[in-house]
């Protein structure tokens, strides 16, 4: 077994009593002593601090005479060229069949692009970017940097005490912000469906900034367990589960993230497949599922409609905000309408469920 | 005083006469984290030692509960439907799962007493 990596907050997690588990090659806190339910509730009602330093951060700078945003568009279907300085987008690296290699956030600083990629994919992503963009861009992985997510309705109030300018930032924007004397890059974004920020920090200042944030009365530390239940309630995809190389952005319900001009013009890997699916519909679709009763249908549970297996659950669990189980999965498009009655096979027993719209818990982004 | 025995699946059984009350240990609830659902067996069902007869769901995962002894299910803890958190709060008290009328009391001999169970848990690191 290879040695697990540690983020700059490893010692702080230990001190806070976290239960550390292996995750994407890192030793990460799955929960603190408060437990997942309390951590989830705290993030929905106040502000939660997550260590997401395991995620990959990459800086992409155009070489002289080149355009980094245009260059990146060769690998993703998102409208990157249209990003104004300080704007952020969600997009995906696609493969030649339109499948998703990874999903990522891209922010333009005006001078360069900042990418945040999934921990489990980061080495492959960097190799992919270098292979295709080395001629036009400087590709700088900055994997040692810290990344803190501060999420929840009181996140702005708490962070603004340390950096007043963040209060005016809108959802999906980014800015350089000085926190505790350190130059950080802050975006108003997250993975909980609620308001919040992600803060990219110099590695050696990450712990001091995390401690400053935890000293705010609104803020408590939150582990990866609650991060997963929060994103599930928000209907957000988890790479490797809800989306993967065999899933296209259209099947995943991510058409909104495909740039309008790019739908027409293509120019990204798998564009032909994606364009065809936009025009005629994908054969299967990601849907929300609401099981009756208390049973929890987890990843891998078969979705049965009228006696036939027509798909599988890709994420499922207990939604603490709703006090009940929720799930998402893929079904054939012909059976994907909201209100469709299905059965989810939980330990060999059919559990009645219904296809419902997502998110399960309303998004609460700050749009100014 | 009722006699409490433990299994290496981290269940406890408190035997009173020929009826055993069964739940999971404090170690088990700590490992599981917040319990959100317990699927308890039907009263009247006859179960065999080692059979998977209940499921405890935490936020993170589902775990099987195995019958520590053979017999008939005579009662299930219905209160867990509305307050599954009892399993975390009082795993050996109000967080009990079900009761079995033992059909073969000699099956208890193979189970651990408290001291042996504590040693077993320590060995898990």
Image (spheres, rainbow, N blue to C red):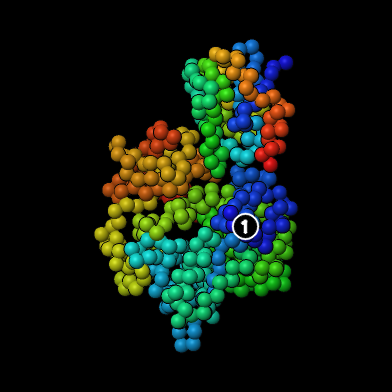
Q: Quadrant of residue A308?
A: top left
**Residue A86 shows up from this direction:** no
Q: Report the label total.
A: 1
| Image quarter (top left, top right, bottom left or bottom right) of the N terminus of chain B | top right
**Residue drawn at 37 percent across, 37 percent down:** A343
Quadrant of the rendered structure where residue B107 is? top right
Q: Mark 1, chain letter?
A: A
Near-viewer residue (A86 or A134):
A134
Q: Which residue is mark 1?
A: A3
* Location of residue A135 in the rendering, given as x and y in whole percent from the top left corner: 45, 81
Asked if residue A147 can be seen in this view, the reply is yes
Residue closest to the far front: A1
Q: Residue furthest left?
A: A280
Residue A250: x percent and y percent?
35, 59
**A80 relative to B10 in the view: left or right:** left
Crowding around mark 1 (Cα neighbors within 10 Å: few <14, some 14 to 19, many 20+) is few
Above or below, comparing residue A326 to residue A83 in the picture? above
Residue drawn at x 59%, y 71% is: A142
Q: Kindly indicate the quadrant of the structure image that contains residue A217.
A: bottom right
Quadrant of image for the C terminus of chain B: top right
Frontmost residue, A314 versus B121: B121
| Residue A293 picture location, percent across and down | 46, 34
Q: Is residue A89 above or below residue B50?
A: below
Residue under the point 69% across and 17% down? B2
Of all residues, the one furthest to the bottom in this rendering is A65
Q: Is residue A307 shown left or right of residue A88?
A: left
Helix, strand or loop for disc 1: loop
Question: Residue A227: where, in percent of width, then height?
Answer: 56, 52
- Which residue sits at x=33%, y=63%? A97
């Amino acid at each position: 077994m290879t040695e697990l990596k540690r983020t700059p907050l490893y010692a702080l997690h230990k001190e806070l009593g976290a239960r550390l588990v292996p995750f994407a090659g890192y030793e990460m806190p799955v929960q603190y002593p408060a437990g997942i339910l309390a951590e989830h509730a705290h993030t929905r009602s106040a502000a939660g601090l997550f260590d997401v330093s395991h995620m990959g951060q990459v800086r992409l700078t155009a070489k002289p005479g080149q355009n980094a945003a245009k260059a990146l568009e060769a690998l993703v279907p998102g409208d990157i060229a249209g990003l104004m300085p300080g704007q952020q987008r969600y997009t995906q690296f696609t493969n030649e069949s339109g499948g998703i290699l990874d999903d990522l956030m891209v922010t333009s600083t005006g001078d360069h692009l900042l990418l945040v990629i999934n921990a489990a994919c980061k080495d492959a992503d960097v190799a992919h970017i270098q292979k295709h963009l080395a001629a036009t861009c400087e590709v700088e992985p900055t994997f040692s940097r810290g990344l803190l997510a501060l999420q929840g309705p009181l996140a702005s109030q708490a962070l603004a005490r340390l950096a007043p300018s963040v209060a005016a930032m809108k959802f999906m924007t980014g800015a350089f912000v000085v926190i505790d004397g350190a130059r950080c890059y802050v975006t108003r974004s997250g993975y909980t469906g609620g308001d919040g920020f992600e803060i990219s920090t110099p590695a050696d200042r990450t712990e001091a900034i995390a401690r400053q944030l935890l000293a705010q009365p609104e803020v408590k530390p939150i582990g990866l367990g609650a991060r997963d239940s929060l994103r599930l309630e928000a209907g957000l995809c988890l790479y490797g589960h809800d989306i993967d190389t065999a899933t296209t952005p259209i099947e995943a319900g991510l058409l909104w993230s495909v740039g309008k001009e790019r739908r027409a013009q293509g120019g990204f890997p798998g564009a032909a497949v994606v364009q065809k699916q936009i025009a005629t519909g994908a054969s299967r679709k990601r849907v929300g599922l609401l099981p009756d009763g208390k049973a929890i249908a987890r990843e891998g549970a078969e979705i049965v409609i009228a006696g036939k297996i027509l798909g599988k659950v890709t994420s499922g669990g207990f939604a603490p905000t709703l006090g009940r189980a929720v799930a998402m999965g893929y079904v054939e498009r012909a059976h994907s309408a909201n209100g469709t009655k299905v059965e989810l096979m939980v330990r060999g027993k059919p559990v009645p469920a219904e296809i419902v719209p997502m998110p399960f818990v309303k998004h609460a982004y700050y749009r100014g | 005083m009722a006699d409490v025995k433990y299994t290496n699946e981290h269940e406890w059984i408190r035997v009173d006469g020929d009826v055993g009350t069964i739940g999971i240990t404090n170690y088990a609830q700590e490992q599981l984290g917040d319990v959100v659902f317990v699927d308890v067996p039907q009263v009247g069902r006859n179960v065999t030692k080692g059979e998977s007869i209940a499921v405890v769901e935490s936020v993170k995962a589902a775990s099987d509960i195995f019958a520590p002894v053979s017999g008939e299910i005579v009662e299930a803890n219905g209160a867990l439907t509305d307050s599954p958190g009892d399993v975390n709060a009082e795993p050996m008290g109000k967080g009990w799962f079900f009761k079995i009328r033992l059909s073969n009391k000699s099956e208890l001999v193979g189970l651990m007493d408290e001291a042996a169970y504590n040693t077993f848990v320590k060995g898990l690191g």
